[in-house]
Amino acid sequence: MSLDNAIRVFAGVMILISVGLTHWVHPNFFYFTLFIGLNLIQSAYTGICPAAWVFKKLGFS
């Protein structure tokens, strides 16, 4: 799997988890979803993605 696809899968999974936590655990978990969205936007503009660094260290290219 390419690095780009791994990041997309990771972002999708994290969004689904955060929506589930918001629904079943506590409404304030929507801040987690907000953080993920803001991180995706800033990485599109700056090219800096912390998840990409981690996935690169795990061997994705």
Image: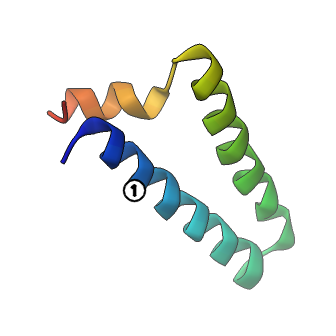
The residue under the point 77% across, 49% down is 34
What's under tag 1, amino acid-wise? Val
Rendered image quadrant of residue 41: top right
Residue 33, image x and y in percent? 71, 55
The residue under the point 69% across, 45% down is 37
Q: Is residue 58 left or right of residue 31?
A: left
Residue 40, image x and y in percent? 61, 37
Q: Is residue 27 left or right of residue 41?
A: right
Residue 61, image x and y in percent? 18, 30
The residue under the point 32% across, 47% down is 6
The residue under the point 68% across, 71% down is 19
Q: Residues within 10 Å of mark 1 (few under 14, many from 20)?
A: few
* Local SS, label 1: helix
Q: Look at mark 1 in the image and give the residue it sits on.
A: 9
Q: Is residue 3 above or below residue 1?
A: above
User: Which one is in front, 51 or 27?
Assistant: 51
